[in-house]
Structure formats: structure tokens, C-alpha cells
């Protein structure tokens, strides 16, 4: 079984997704996962590919998200471990029964919602991602009306599951998304 690459992830997602905002979200989560992989000394491209592909079934099955990942990815030759990692980001939220256990799974669970807040904040700043501070992001995070659809409890739980301070998680997310800012505007 070949390793999942970012190019392969992009090819697969394009078969199942048409909405531009979902591609932008895929790029944001991919960027954050690349930064998380660097933090954990893991394979950055592999984690970025996982992040890019994490919502592969969302557009077709929004009410059953994470429950159709296996049927979409097995025919593509994606490993069972990678499929399990993708499914695990919906644990406790979508009926997904795979609990995040690995650093990659826990990272995906943690950054999925956080990228929404970081991205929304970047869109209201003249300098976008450049110079975004954890301190200012934390203020936005505390304002429940800002990016209201992003689940703060999931982000907080994700940081706790990683044994990571929320500020460090935010810093890594900002770092990854800043590195890929051109894809996220």
C-alpha cells in the first residue's frame, strides 16, 4: 500500500467535493497538521495529507459525516490506519466510534475546529495571518459570538488530550496556516 501523499489527497477530495469553502477548510487543516507533525517529529507531508482529506465525506453525507469515509477511501488504496485516523476526528461528535489515540489522531481532532477560528480572525485583519498573536487569538476564542459555529469545547478537549497548553496549540495552528496563507485567502 502506497503512502498517502498530499497530491493523492487533493486528487481524492476533488472526486467527492465541489464547494470551495470545503477546499479552503481542507487546506487550513492540512497546514495546521503539517505544523503539528513538525512539533511531534512526524512525517509532515503525511499528516498534511490526512488533514486535507479529513472531510472527504462531508459534502455528500453532512448528516452522517465520518460514517462514509471507509467506503470512499478503501477503493482508493488508502490504508486502514489512515482511514481510522480520518474517522477519529468525529469521535463523540458524529457517531464515529474510533477514539483519537495517536498524536496524529489527537492533533486532527484538536485543530479541525481551531482552524475555523484562526481563519475567521485572519479574514478580519488587514495583515491577515502575518503577525497574528496567540494573545489576540485567545481574546477571539473567548468571544463565543465570534466564529460561533466553531466548537470551543472540542478544541479545549483536543488540547487536553494532547497534553498541550491551548496557547501552544494555537501557536502551532497559526504557524502552519501562516506558512500556507496564499492558499487560504
Image (cartoon, grey):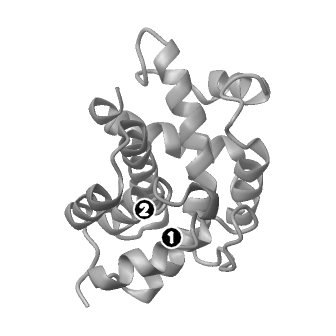
Residue denoted by label 1: 86
Residue denoted by label 2: 56
Residue that extends furthest to the top in the rendered view of this protein: 126
CB contact under 8 Å: marks 2 and 1: yes
Q: Quadrant of residue 140?
A: top right
Residue 80 location in percent, x, y?
44, 88
Residue that extends furthest to the bottom in the rendered view of this protein: 1
Residue at the (64%, 64%) spot, across then down: 90
Q: Is residue 98 visible?
A: yes
Q: Is residue 16 left or right of residue 39?
A: left
Residue at the (77%, 56%) spot, across then down: 157
> Which of the two labelled residues, at mark 2 and mark 1, occupies the earlier sequence position?
2
Label 1 crowd bin: few (<14), some (14–19), many (20+), radius 10 Å: many
Residue 170 location in percent, x, y?
60, 41
Residue 63 location in percent, x, y?
63, 58
User: Is residue 165 shown above or below 130?
Assistant: below
Estimate the spatial distance between the alpha carbons at disc 2 and disc 1, rounded to whole Å: 9 Å
Question: Between 94 and 141, which is closer to the camera in this rendering?
Answer: 94
Question: Between 73 and 160, which is closer to the camera in this rendering?
Answer: 73
Foreground label between 2 and 1: 2
Q: Quadrant of residue 97?
A: bottom right
Q: In this figure, what is the number of numbered marks?
A: 2
Residue 146 location in percent, x, y?
70, 23
Residue at the (51%, 43%) spot, across then down: 173
Label 2 crowd bin: few (<14), some (14–19), many (20+), radius 10 Å: many
As helix, strand or loop, the secondary structure at mark 1 comes to helix
As helix, strand or loop, the secondary structure at mark 2 comes to loop
Q: Is residue 132 visible?
A: no
Question: Between 66 and 85, which is closer to the camera in this rendering?
Answer: 66
Amino acid at each position: 500500500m502506497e503512502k498517502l501523499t498530499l497530491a493523492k489527497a487533493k486528487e481524492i477530495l476533488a472526486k467527492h467535493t465541489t464547494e470551495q469553502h470545503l477546499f479552503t477548510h481542507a487546506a487550513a487543516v492540512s497546514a495546521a497538521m503539517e505544523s503539528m507533525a513538525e512539533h511531534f517529529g512526524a512525517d509532515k507531508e503525511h499528516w498534511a495529507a490526512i488533514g486535507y482529506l479529513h472531510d472527504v465525506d462531508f459534502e455528500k453525507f453532512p448528516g452522517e459525516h465520518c460514517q462514509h469515509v471507509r467506503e470512499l477511501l478503501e477503493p482508493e488504496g488508502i490504508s486502514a490506519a489512515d482511514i481510522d485516523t480520518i474517522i477519529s476526528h468525529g469521535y463523540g461528535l458524529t457517531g464515529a466510534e474510533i477514539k483519537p489515540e495517536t498524536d496524529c489522531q489527537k492533533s486532527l481532532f484538536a485543530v479541525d475546529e481551531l482552524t475555523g477560528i484562526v481563519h475567521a480572525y485572519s479574514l478580519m485583519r488587514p495583515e491577515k495571518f502575518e503577525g497574528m498573536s496567540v494573545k489576540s487569538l485567545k481574546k477571539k476564542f473567548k468571544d463565543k459570538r465570534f466564529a460561533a459555529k466553531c466548537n470551543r469545547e472540542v478544541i479545549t478537549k483536543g488540547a487536553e488530550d494532547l497534553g498541550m497548553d491551548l496557547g501552544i496549540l494555537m501557536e502551532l495552528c497559526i504557524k502552519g496556516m501562516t506558512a500556507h496563507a496564499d492558499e487560504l485567502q
